[in-house]
Image (cartoon, rainbow, N blue to C red):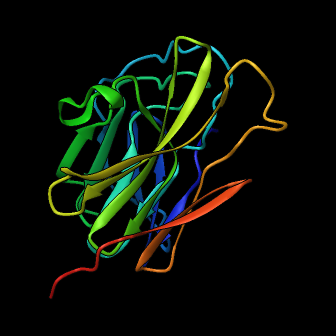
Amino acid sequence: MTAAPTVLGSRVFICEGHRIRAIDVDSRDEQWSRELGSVGMERGTGAVADLSAIAADDGLLVVYEGHALPTQRTGNARVWCLDPATGATLWNAVVDGLEGREELSGLFPVGRPVLAADVVVVAARKPTQRLEQVDWLLALDRRDGHLRWATSVAGAPANRSSIGRKHAGLATDGSVVVDATPRRVSQRPALRRQS
């Protein structure tokens, strides 16, 4: 299984790449289930690079379509924002070329989304023509998914092992998103929710 269960209240959420399910923790009954984008046999090659992680709070549930492979994502490079109670779509955004920005062309989401104040922070990656990987952080507005900011945070050869590779990580205390590489740690305001 390439999924990491997420618990919110009395529900367990599990994403299987192109399908997400909400299961009641007490009865084990499926509360809802829905497809994410295109459905069918995944034909990606290589080892799966993430565990279809989900981020959820009382207002929204964020998940990526498909599975991340070393240089691509199966299915679309789409971020889905759903109502955790019903599974209804609140918004979705394809990060590959998001909002027509050329520098974001080729991006696909990886890892676990982070829910911060007014944004959903997504780590994304893209291969370059020089066989390198470039990592980005994208902040999508919680209300509608539009891009609030984007920044490149790391890059490394894609065809080598992860030993010695710069890694970008995400952490949040509700007010600041932190990205880190071995030689640099920087903070970016996460934007507070307006009451």
Is residue 21 among what the camera can see? yes
Residue 183 sits above or below residue 135 on the image? below
Q: Going by the image, does 21 lie left or right of 59? A: right
Taking depth in this image into account, of 111 and 101 the one nearest to the observer is 101
User: Which quarter of the figure has residue 119?
Assistant: bottom left
Residue at the far front: name it. 183
Is residue 96 among what the camera can see? no
- State the image coordinates of residue 9 (x, y, percent, origin top left): 42, 78
- State the image coordinates of residue 73 (x, y, percent, origin top left): 47, 26
State how many labels appear: 0
Residue 99 sits above or below residue 21 on the image? above
Q: Residue at x 59, y 27 (%)?
A: 133
Q: Residue at x 34, y 24 (%)?
A: 105
Residue 122 sits above or below residue 23 on the image? above
Q: Going by the image, does 84 lie left or right of 12? A: left
Q: Residue at x 51, y 62 (%)?
A: 6
